Amino acid sequence: MTRAQFEDRLFGVLRWVVIAFLAVITLLPFYYMLLLSLKPIDALLLDPGSLWVSTKDFTLSTYRDVLRSTDAGGQGFLKFLLNSALVSLGTVALTLLAAVPGAYAISRLKFFGHRQVSALFLAVYLFPATLLAVPLFVIFAKLHLSSSLVGLAIVYVAQTVPVSIYMLKNYLVTIPYTIEEAAALDGCSRLQTVRKVILPLALPSLMATGLYVFMIAWNEFLFALLFLAADPDKWTVSLGLAQLSNGVEVPKTVLMAGSVVLTIPVVLLFFAAERLLTEGLTSGADKS
Amino acid sequence: MTTAPTGAPERRDTSTGSANRPARRGRRPMTAGRRANRAGLAFVSPTFVVVLVVVILPIAWTVLLAFQHAKLVDIQGMGLFGNWTLDNFTQVFGSAGFWQSLTTTLLYTAGGTFGSVILGLIAALALRKPFKGRGLLRAAMLLPYVAPVVAVAFVWEVALSPQYGVVNDWGRRLFGWDDPIAFLSTREYEVGLLGVHFEIPLALLTVIAFECWRYFPFAFLFILARLQAVPDGLEEAALVDGATPTQRFRHILLPQLMPVLALLCVLRFIMTFNKFDDVYLLTGGGAGTDVAAVRVYDFLTARYDVGAAAAQALVLAVSLMILLGFYFKFFANKVQEES
């Protein structure tokens, strides 16, 4: 057997081993999450190694417990879900409002300092979120915004504007400039061109960017912890789950149901728009 | 605060719009370059104002705070300037475990970065050629990246738990472990291999593994996109010349992938270096996983010492910039030459 034949065979086998391994490490944890959320805590303690749930143990009471409001003896995740949704949607709206004009300007217009500005926006990521956390914590404490969802949304905008500008800009440069010239010849002002020509054309990119921002805001934890920890009424789902999992009072299987509730919206959105999102994120990566 | 800047371009743009028409009262019409310049500044200014207010000013203030005596209680009455001091830095550098924590951060960052990029590379190579169910697996592989960190960290915590975790249960059944292993709270774990006993930082390795698992999809996405843009002709030519798979990878694919790999390493390095939530959620910074970002959080919330937290965060940012500076000075050009 020549070296080439040997390698062909070796990698032919290895490839399937790798594929199986990847499938296991990515799917198993999520299967485990779902599994534990469907059984009572006694069943978990009795047999921690079991990878299925028997019909005898199967229960949905964990979900009832986790979603019911605290007054009714549950964990109040329904309220947390609402908070998370409000903050995330607000962040998406504000971020797009702030990012679209900037991205358009950077992609299209040769204005004084356009190079520096786009570098500046990306340089923001050199600074750790913790560096931003200190002054924002102090400012918000001063403004009495520190335990409000509005304050949190503003912080998330700070985290997501630079990457949104980057993603939108990558898409906008692919729209031919001649379309804009045609619109200008037809008598559109610059703003009309943006609203009537560029934005409809950029809709896929706007959606991809909006989704990505939603994911970041929905999954965020550090700032929620810093700003809202003292006020359980305002907790987001992420924060609620983290705070409750530190204690021993709430059974782990109930919290597992909470994890499922926390994960499902993001995963559903992601699968609905997977192609859109992956292309939006990696556009530009295939050009060297 | 955010509605004001978005209103701004409309007002300004109508003025540039009217300037589009030939100017009345005998003024010379603006050149296209000047109009673009004006419109550009008008469009970028709302975005710029938002970034300035929520990002740049806070960072500047952090730098100021790092040089002041500032506890959260007396910050209300404090001016922006005053009480200059270097105490915060002596406190940060002198505090127990600072250097230890910096080393931990570096190990964690290097491990997480290279681990996730290499795993992403392997995954991209394996999923390069079509097979049945490839689209589904590709989507499923992005799950660790898109799922909320709190949820997945909680799953890992439960799965690795010594009391009710699935990993320890299966470990005892399949590998005959005598005692359950507390993956997330064991600082040093003694391993005997071929009669040699040595200790490994188990909790640190576990959080690094978590980091690799959570972020390899990110690397995978970028590498796969680049891989599919490699022209087929190159590889076919190498195949005709009798190159083996490893040779084709080393001499054809790798040079093509080098720029995106380098970019990914830099991106992941920056992100992991500043990472807070993963470590905090898994171990709370205990058992030898006290990365610097968790220390900043501790300064801020446990002691309400804003000055020290700012100083620690600043030291973190500066060390990152020094590392990146080294990278761009010595390696960035090399990668570009190779590609």
Image (spheres, helix red, strand yellow):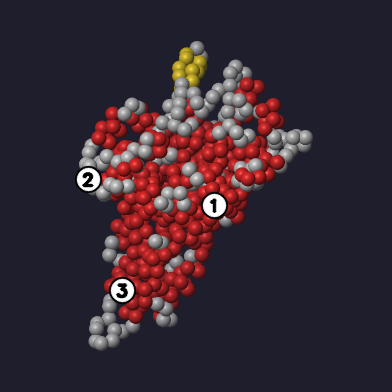
Cα distance in 3D space between marks 1 and 2? 40 Å
Q: Quadrant of residue B70?
A: top left
Q: Residue B231, can we see it?
A: no
Element under disc 1: helix
The chain holding disc 3 is: B
- With respect to residue A258, does B198 lie above or below? above
Looking at the picture, which amino acid does disc 3 mark? Answer: Arg
**Residue at point 64%, 36% (across, down):** A253
Cα distance in 3D space between marks 3 and 2? 45 Å
Q: Which residue is nearer to you in this view: A234 or A42?
A: A234
Looking at the picture, which amino acid does disc 1 mark? Answer: Asn
Q: Quadrant of residue B170?
A: top right
Looking at the picture, which amino acid does disc 2 mark? Answer: Gly
Q: Earlier in the sequence, mark 3 or mark 2?
A: 3
Element under disc 3: helix
Q: Position of residue B122 (x, y in %)?
A: 51, 39
Residue ID for mark 1: A83
Residue ID for mark 2: B82
**Residue at point 55%, 46% (across, down):** A237
Q: Which residue is nearer to you in this view: A15 or A95?
A: A95
The residue mark sitting in front, 1 or 3, is 1
- With respect to residue A201, does A12 lie above or below? above
